[in-house]
Image (tube, helix red, strand yellow):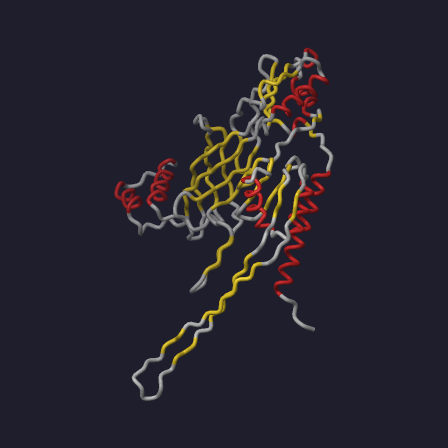
């Protein structure tokens, strides 16, 4: 049996990708509007994560620690903090002499995200990253490190063994590495010592912040809440809905907010096309529409073949042997049909048209840019 043509295999792969793309967008365009809970559309003002940072020391490394002046200075300060007084000459040599071995320790930055309503005694995860020239943090142990907020207050203390999801194998002439061995995580590695005050209900009022601000969505949220509890909600702007706590919930704002969060509305979504040029991924929103437009798409393929020849002079002549280049080049442009997309076309119509043209996924971004430039695409075009 004859071997399959590589071009046929490429075309079949392209058709499979386009058919999957067409099925996805067609299914999206035919789907009915979905009711979404208010809690999935909004955030409560004042309820947020807080970022904590600290600078610590990881010990117990297997000759993969740092050798920079920062490492030696930090090691000296660490010893003095625990009452170990070094001779001035020893301190000077440890800070400046690169022959002093400190490759079993590493200076690291410790970061954590403290969720709201976290109480004293509870734990949070921390990320540990090398601050000096350490090669790997695998097998290291983080010494007690205070974590502070932007206000300088210490809210948590971190410590524990560093888990590094990486490995490095080195041979005489080559090495291989997976992920980054200079960053790791400590699960439940920090204990909260001081709580962060979170006020979400002030003077009997609270605010909901829409994650995707929109006038119509804010209006729908307001109407839905007022239907459940009259004169309770007011749209301040496209991204903010203010709530007034009813007298029945005056002492139980948590239950009131839970009830409001369970109310379902139909959010309005902007017509948007998002293109990721690095991966060739394109996401098309349901409300994307096209004016009447004519599309054609053709691929230009250029084939080259190098066949150098050796020119050999006659025997006993004064000529030289030289290599003469020989190049064969050909350009082939595939014929593509014209395809007309009618006015008020949906996402499914657009997918069908692009599928009929046999457009590879990575060429879709160029086509959408040209549709926008022609004024036929009625949607926001976003590139990532």
Q: Foreground: 6 or 149?
A: 6
Quadrant (top left, top right, bottom left, bottom right) of the N terminus:
bottom right
Q: Extreme bottom residue here?
A: 316
Residue name at image x 67 percent, y 14 percent: 232
Q: Foreground: 367 or 243?
A: 367
Q: Position of residue 244 (x, y in %)?
A: 64, 14
Q: Foreground: 325 or 336?
A: 336
Q: Position of residue 151 (x, y in %)?
A: 44, 25
Q: Is residue 227 left or right of residue 325?
A: right
Count of marks, rendered view:
0
Q: Position of residue 274 (x, y in %)?
A: 58, 40
Q: Extreme top residue here?
A: 247
Residue name at image x 29 percent, y 48 percent: 97
Q: Position of residue 337 (x, y in %)?
A: 64, 53
Residue 164's place in the image compared with 300, above or below, is above
Residue 264's place in the image compared with 337, above or below, is above
Which of the 4 image quadrants contains residue 202? top right
């Amino acid at each position: 049996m004859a071997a399959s043509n590589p071009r046929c295999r490429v075309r079949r792969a392209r058709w499979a990708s386009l058919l999957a793309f067409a099925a996805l967008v067609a299914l999206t365009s035919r789907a009915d509007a979905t009711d979404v809970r208010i809690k999935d559309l909004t955030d409560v003002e004042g309820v947020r994560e807080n970022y904590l940072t600290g600078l610590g020391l990881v010990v117990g490394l297997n000759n993969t620690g740092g050798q920079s002046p920062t490492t030696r200075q930090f090691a000296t300060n660490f010893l003095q903090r625990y009452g170990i007084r070094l001779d001035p000459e020893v301190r000077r040599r440890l800070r400046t002499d690169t022959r002093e071995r400190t490759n079993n320790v590493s200076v690291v930055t410790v970061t954590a995200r403290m969720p709201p309503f976290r109480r004293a005694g509870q734990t949070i995860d921390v990320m540990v990253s090398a601050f000096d020239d350490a090669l790997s943090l695998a097998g290291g142990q983080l010494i007690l490190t205070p974590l502070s907020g932007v206000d300088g207050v210490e809210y948590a203390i971190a410590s524990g063994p560093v888990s590094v999801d990486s490995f490095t194998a080195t041979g005489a002439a080559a090495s291989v590495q997976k992920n980054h061995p200079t960053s790791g995580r400590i699960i439940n590695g920090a204990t909260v010592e001081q709580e962060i005050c979170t006020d979400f209900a002030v003077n009997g009022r609270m605010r909901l912040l829409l994650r995707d601000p929109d006038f119509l969505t804010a209006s729908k949220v307001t109407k839905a809440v007022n239907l459940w509890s009259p004169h309770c909600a007011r749209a301040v702007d496209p991204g903010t809905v203010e709530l007034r706590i009813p007298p029945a919930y005056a002492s139980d704002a948590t239950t009131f907010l839970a009830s409001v969060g369970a109310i379902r509305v139909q959010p309005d979504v902007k017509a948007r096309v998002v293109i990721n040029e690095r991966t060739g991924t394109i996401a098309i929103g349901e409300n994307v529409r096209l004016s009447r437009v004519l599309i054609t798409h053709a691929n230009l393929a250029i084939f080259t073949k190098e066949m150098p020849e050796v020119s050999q002079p006659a025997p006993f002549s004064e000529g030289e042997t030289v290599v003469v280049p020989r190049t064969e080049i050909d350009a082939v442009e595939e014929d593509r049909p014209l395809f007309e997309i009618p006015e008020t076309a949906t996402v499914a119509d657009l997918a069908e048209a692009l599928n009929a043209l046999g457009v590879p996924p990575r060429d879709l971004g160029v086509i959408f840019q040209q549709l926008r430039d022609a004024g036929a695409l009625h949607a926001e075009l976003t590139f990532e």
